[in-house]
Image: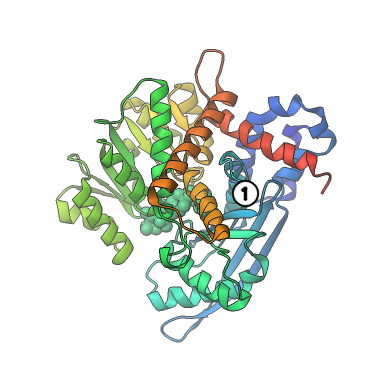
Amino acid sequence: MKASEVLDNLKRRFPNEPEYHQAVSEVLATIEEAYNEHPEFEKSNLIERLCIPDRIFSFRVTWMDDKGQIQTNMGYRIQHNNAIGPYKGGVRFHASVNLSILKFLAFEQTFKNSLTTLPMGGGKGGSDFSPRGKSNAEIMRFCQAFVLELWRHIGPDTDVPAGDIGVGGREVAYMYGMYKKLARENTGTFTGKGLEFGGSLVRPEATGYGNVYFLLQMLKTRGIELAGKTVCVSGSGNVAQYTVEKLISLGAKVVTMSDSDGYIYDPDGIDRAKLDYIMELKNLYRGRIREYAEQYGCKYVQGARPWGEKCDIAMPSATQNEINGEDAQKLLANGCFAVSEGANMPSTPEAIEAFLKAKILYAPGKAANAGGVSVSGLEMTQNAQKLSWSAEEVDQKLQSIMQNIHEQCVKYGQQPDGYVNYVKGANVAGFMKVAKAMMAQGIL
Ligand code: NDP
Ligand code: 2IT
């Protein structure tokens, strides 16, 4: 089957899964040339085998809320592809979670993990449970109920979950605690664990720091300094917080952050003390970003995203499809010359087209946000060795992985005029490794 036919076929067989179609469509459009150079791929129907997950588990999760009411949610785990290593990828708790979203994330994860240089396949899981407004006790009971079903499908050499939207250190700890009761082993089947029980230093920071390291590599290709540049960041969760932390430490000026209700614009820049306030607000009190504007007397815009504000660099770090074609035009009109994605698939196809047409530095999430899963991979290695490495050692490895991913993107994405199409580079590099591994292991 030709690459283009695969997408039509998937749309017909799996209708009503727009995010999944979007992720597959972007990859197929960029790998067609590489695919056509290998007729053996078509003979073994490789693309279709790579696009359809190996298996999907779905289950009911039943838990009791603080009022004594019995609640049900849906739980899922997608094991997408394990050609290069055990299934690996996060768990998302958000009201919007459905099969389309998890299939897109598991598909993307497979290519991202391939780029990390570490032996990890791709997977993703989650639930339509909304953590918003839930007590700590409710979060714990939900996590335990979720793992009561999930545990039989995961293991240190088969499938290793971690965090994503709505799942951070607190949730991973609750899930891991329950997992150990059931599985009776201590080999670290989750990553993003607490430091006292097998977690890795720098894992909380890794996605945000890694994105800034990738950005630095891109800026270097054009001889641009980061210090003094104005940056718009979206989101105010794990990825956004550590992106801002690293940006501030390198002398950039961050003027926006957001949550699902709106965004703040601070023309003076978010400094270390203000970021500490946000971390406490979001991680401890689970408050709203609006409160920052009240605290520091700056602008808050309800129900909007920050892309209309003037910046040099944009780092979307909230969720999928948060930059549409119109947002992209606004960014470009205001002089934005670099977009580096902390979130997964935050730009719509129209936005990506606009960035590539304008030939700005544009890094897709599967390259730029791979630092998180990379340090998860390093956490797995430390667990297997029953050792823990220093923060400097982990950070050094993270920096060299991000540099390596950047090199792969340049190798496969540089055009005759010198412009680096990081979308093509990341997709072709990620694809070739998984494709070769699948070919070598036979028709499965
Ligand atoms: P968090 O739950 O810590 O934070 C998510 C942030 O995004 C919050 O500010 C949240 O606002 C906002 N947000 C979530 N959903 C929406 C929505 N539908 N519309 C607008 N805003 C929204 O998650 P992370 O920081 O971990 O994840 C952010 C992104 O980064 C996701 O795309 C994730 O897949 C990706 N990612 C995460 C990695 C990780 O290691 N954690 C690794 C690689 C990528 P609110 O508080 O109002 O919900
Ligand atoms: O999207 C991602 O790469 C993550 N949420 C992190 C996955 C992981 O296994 O650390």
The picture places residue 277, in percent across and down from the top left corner, at: 22, 56
Q: Is residue 365 left or right of residue 34?
A: left
Vertical order, 365 against 222 (above or below)? below
The type of residue carrying mark 1 is Met
Q: Residue furthest left?
A: 297
The picture places residue 326, in percent across and down from the top left corner, at: 42, 34
Quadrant location of the N terminus in the rendered image: top right
| Label 1: element kind | loop
Q: Residue furthest top?
A: 417
Residue closer to the observer: 22 or 138: 138
Vertical order, 381 against 248 (above or below)? below
User: At x 61% / y 41%, what residue is drawn?
Assistant: 114
Residue closer to the observer: 248 or 74: 248
Mark 1 close to ligand 2, CB under 8 Å:
yes
User: At x 45% / y 81%, what residue is drawn?
Assistant: 65
Q: Is residue 19 left or right of residue 263?
A: right
What residue is pinned by disc 1?
Answer: 120
Q: How is the image coloured?
A: rainbow
Local crowd size for mark 1, using a 10 Å CA cut-off: few (<14), some (14–19), many (≥20): many
The picture places residue 417, in percent across and down from the top left corner, at: 52, 12
The picture places residue 262, in percent across and down from the top left corner, at: 32, 51
Taking the image as drawn, is residue 404 in sight?
yes
User: At x 45% / y 87%, what residue is drawn?
Assistant: 68
Residue closer to the observer: 134 or 429: 429
Vertical order, 47 against 375 (above or below)? above
Quarter of the image holding residue 10? top right
Q: Is residue 129 left or right of residue 287?
A: right
